Amino acid sequence: MSNWDILWDERAQFWSGFLSTLEIFGLSIVGAFVIGCGLLYLLEGSRKRLTIPLRIFIDSMRMLPFLILAYLLYYGLPSVGIRLDAWWSGVGALAVYHGAYFAEIFRGNRLTFPPGQIEAAKAHGFTKGKMFFRLLLPQIIMQTRPLLGNQLIYALKDTAFLVIITVSELTAAANSLSSTYFIPTEAFIVVIGFYWAISVTMEIIIKQCGRFSAKRGFDNV
Amino acid sequence: MSEANMSERAAVSIRHLSKSFDDVEVLRDVELEVKTGEVVTIIGSSGSGKSTLLRCINWLEKPDRGSIHIAGQRIGVHEDGRPMPVRELAKVRAQTGMVFQGFNLWPHLNVLHNVTEAPIHVQGKSKREAEELATALLEKVGMSHKHDSYPNTLSGGQKQRVAIARALAMQPEVMLFDEPTSALDPELVGEVLAVIKDLSAEGYTMVMVTHEMAFARAVSDQVVFLEKGLIIERADPETFFTTPKTDRVRKFLENHDTPSPA
Ligand SMILES: Nc1ncnc2c1ncn2[C@@H]1O[C@H](COP(=O)(O)OP(=O)(O)OP(=O)(O)O)[C@@H](O)[C@H]1O
Ligand SMILES: [Mg+2]
């Protein structure tokens, strides 16, 4: 029986690891996106009293290695009385961490947003909330699409760290099979294939979105 | 008649308006009354405060002193001096339609949706009602063949005509134009001026800043000359362009090719 045959027999483990990674990734990027948009909204036209702490939060997330944040949520939070299981700690850490990155990407683009469009919105009776969700956010998302795509790939790769806080995802499956049968190379090659498939699918989706924004003249990024 | 009564009748009523940027007084005790159906043109050299005056009318700039009423409704602050909550300010603002030099269309929305955006999402009109109105307005500005186009595919003149339709869609009490043709190639100026001229013929109330003297003479009911934030001359267009009272205006008109009577 070749090493590959062994892995084929154990395909159920890979599959459940893959589904688990997909689930963690999907949930955490939705969370990160919402957090990123939320931070951008709070930064929009707010007082310094609010924007300074937000900026500090965003910057401190960006300076923190992801693994340490995951450790903090999993091992550190119980000491302040909040106990999350490994899975939710992982999803939470990913969402918060990449949410801060999303916010930073959005904020950078917001700085170059044409002020005339904002004035036009005000002149047409828009208030902050409507203006943000109808005019600012859609354009900022279209403009930053390539950067967001990159960030999604980082987020996908960061899911692999969660093996260290005992989340049973794709890398954990490979890890366990490689140590049970002593076939690390083959086990990890399979896992690379899975990550690669997710990334390529994501790239294709983002390309498709690109057509949508190119039609509106947002292709110059 | 009392002052309050006059304000109610006017589309725009500006009293004792002053505004400084840093230490420079950009508007000084400006008084202006725009009656419903009237076209008022503001003329003046660069930096005289024309844009600032226009932008105070819809509170894009906050005046330091004075009051502005749109159709009898005070904008920006309440009569008793309380600041106006943003929602209320937005409502009064929506009584004015502004057309900018740089068009400022929303590039992620197609032509039709640029025009229906505010009626639907600010005024709460139904989609159908807003689209019917938009279709009629785009027809009026000669852009009905471009419903589905995005702003990046339009010429400057076309963009500005869409921007005019967008502002009209609010069904405002007054339209404000800030040099609507200054950013256009010369051969595109005419199509935009023609639209504005049609609007004046239809009885729209308009306040306009322009350097197109012949146009100003043809469409205005009242011409106002601004100099260093002060209105130094106001008259009907015939008087203004043929027999200006001040040397300053005479000089200004000499430097801009004075239009022959239309
Ligand atoms: N936001 C601002 N901050 C500081 N100064 C300003 C601001 N806006 C305008 N000014 C100054 O106020 C003065 C009047 O400006 P305004 O734009 O109203 O002039 P204008 O008559 O419209 O000129 P133009 O014909 O060049 O458009 C100018 O000296 C200008 O530099
Ligand atoms: Mg100006």
Image (spheres, coloured by chain):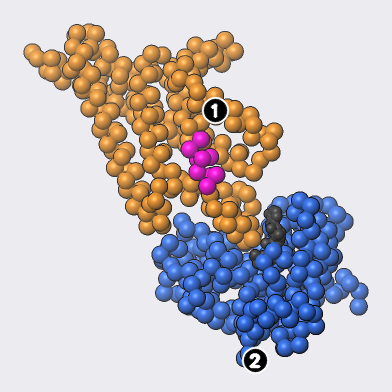
Chain colours: A orange, B blue
The quarter holding residue B259 reads bottom right
Relative to B87, B109 lies left or right? left
Is residue A10 positioned above or below A137 on the image? above
Q: Main secondary structure of the magenta part?
A: helix
Image quarter where the N terminus of chain A lies is top left
Relative to B199, B140 lies left or right? left
Label 2 – label 1 distance at C-alpha: 65 Å
Is residue B13 positioned above or below A4 on the image? below
Residue closer to the observer: B64 or A96: B64
Relative to B255, A183 lies left or right? left
Q: Are marks 2 and 1 in contact (CB under 8 Å)?
A: no
Residue closer to the observer: B235 or A211: B235
Do circles 2 and 1 both sit on a common chain? no
Residue bearing the label numbered 2: B261
Q: Is the CB atom of the residue marked by disc 1 within 8 angstroms of ligand 1's nearest atom?
A: no
Q: Which residues are magenta?
A: A104-112
Q: Position of residue A183 (x, y in %)?
A: 18, 12
SS type, badge 1:
helix
Q: Residue at x 44, y 43 (%)?
A: A144
Tell which subunit mark 2 falls on.
B
Q: Amino acid at mark 2?
A: Pro
Tell which subunit mark 1 falls on.
A
Residue bearing the label numbered 1: A59
The quarter holding residue B201 reads bottom right
Residue closer to the observer: B61 or B132: B61
Q: Residue at x 54, y 64 (%)?
A: B103
Can residue B134 be seen from the camera position used here? no
Q: Position of residue B101 (x, y in %)?
A: 58, 66
* Mark 2 crowdedness (10 Å alpha carbons): few <14, some 14-19, many ≥20: few
- Whether residue A107 is in magenta: the answer is yes
Q: Position of residue B230 (x, y in %)?
A: 80, 68
Can residue B81 be seen from the camera position used here? yes
